[in-house]
Amino acid sequence: MKSSAPSYSPRCLVIVPVFNERDAVGKLVRRLRRSLPDFCDILVIDDGSTDDTAHQVPPGTAVVALPFNLGIGGAMQTGYRYAALNDYQLAVQVDGDGQHRPTEVCRLIHHLVQNDLDLVVGSRFLTPSRFYHQTVVRKAGAGFLRRVIRLLTGLDMTDPTSGFRAASRRVIEAFAHWYPEDYPEPEVILLLHRMGFAIDEVSVRMRQRRTGQSSIGLISGLFYVAKVTTCLLLDLVRRPWPTGKLNAGAGAIDPNELNHDDRQTTDSPADWRRPAPAGGPAPQSIQA
Amino acid sequence: MFLILGLPFLGLSLFPGGVGWMADWLRIDYRTVMLLCVTAFFLLVTLELLTIVSVQDRKITTLAQHVGILMQSRSGQGDPTGGGEGSDKSS
């Protein structure tokens, strides 16, 4: 049964990064197939799993198998690069551990398109819930990062570490060009805000993790907060994406602006856009 | 590059009194100043090496992403754009 699809039909890629999630990935993909509208495609990024995660993905689903583990940042950027190459107008991140509900994907897309936003974050805490519980360390860390982001940007993001997100074409191109490697979620909020992208939250329900192992434990949680806070402070002077033209509209990035750093190792955003075929179909309009 | 930059470290590890000798040779009155200069040099060398490693790491990441995407495109298995067999909309 398909969920009620919005009236618009942009091409949307649902990116599912997985690493050793053999027990969850098959179920998740089947749920996504049942829940997503027809304009959404699914792409599973197998981030160098050491088990048979890739074989648990139901046949017929696109899988990008990375040759070795790149971490969440590298895996997500692979998905955004794929989306940029294949002319997707929207992209949605869905964690492979099954915490994100496929039925909530449409709400993210709807909120993004209706309000002409660039990034929508699915928040577990925008509406208080008695059913979702976090450990004390996680709660304290997320609360601290929320305050840091509010201090640095003025944005009150109730769930800055949420990986359940929907992105516009402009953000897809920006992420295809550069994306943080470690713990990217809080960082990109600050960076996108500094670059003038429109960001908002929408309340979503999430499941508790039942399978696999979380990448954040007690010690690593403290390290995570310290590292992300340092990165956020450094991001105040960092310019990962070319300025100016990014705000002028989708596909308006000038590759010449990328020459500001001779150590640039990422490709020009223009390289991540496939030229439209001559006489091909015109892009579908979005009617909210 | 790494070997050349590592030579000063090797030299000082073999001759710990080298800092004092260099201070005398350069006619620096206070050996502590020479020690600070050597420390600053080592820090710069370390930062340079870290920068090189970081750039190479980015390149390897980009290469791995290219490989993954190209392998998927080549196999065409479950092409979400509908170009391959068994699109995920087919089931």
Image (cartoon, coloured by chain):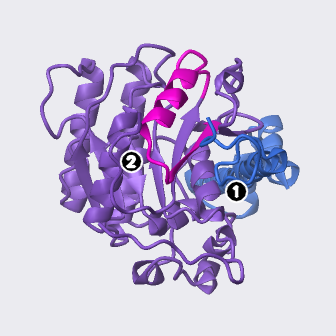
**Rendering coords of residue A27 (x, y %):** 52, 22
Q: Chain of mark 1?
A: B
Residue A60 lies, in percent from the top left, at: 69, 36
Position of A128 compared to B64: left or right? left
Q: Secondary structure at mark 2?
A: strand
| Chain under numbered label 2 | A
The image quadrant of residue A133 is top left
The residue labelled by disc 1 is: B55
A130 magenta-colored: no
**Side of B30 where A10 appears, left or right:** left
Tell me: residue A103, above or below residue B23.
above
Question: Which shade is chain B?
Answer: blue
Decide if residue B37 is in sight here: no
Q: Amino acid at mark 1?
A: Val
Q: Share a chain, discs 1 and 2?
A: no
Quadrant containing the N terminus of chain B is bottom right
Q: Distance between the Cα atoms at labels 1 and 2?
A: 28 Å
Please name which of the two marks, 1 or 2, marks the residue nearer to the observer. 2
Please, is residue B85 above or below residue A194 in the view? above
The colour of chain A is purple
Q: Residues within 10 Å of mark 1 (few under 14, many from 20)?
A: some
User: In the rendering, at what x and y percent does residue B46 appear?
Assistant: 66, 50
Whether residue A128 appears in this view of the structure is yes
Q: Which residues are magenta?
A: A19-45
- Between A147 and B85, the residue placed more toward the observer is B85
Please give the residue where the numbered disc 2 appears in the rendered image: A165
Question: Element at badge 1?
Answer: helix
> Which of the 4 image quarters holds residue A68?
top right
User: Residue A118: percent from the left, percent from the top?
Assistant: 36, 64
**Vertically, is A252 above or below A70?**
below
At x 19%, y 35%, the residue is A125
Q: Residues within 10 Å of mark 2 (few under 14, many from 20)?
A: many
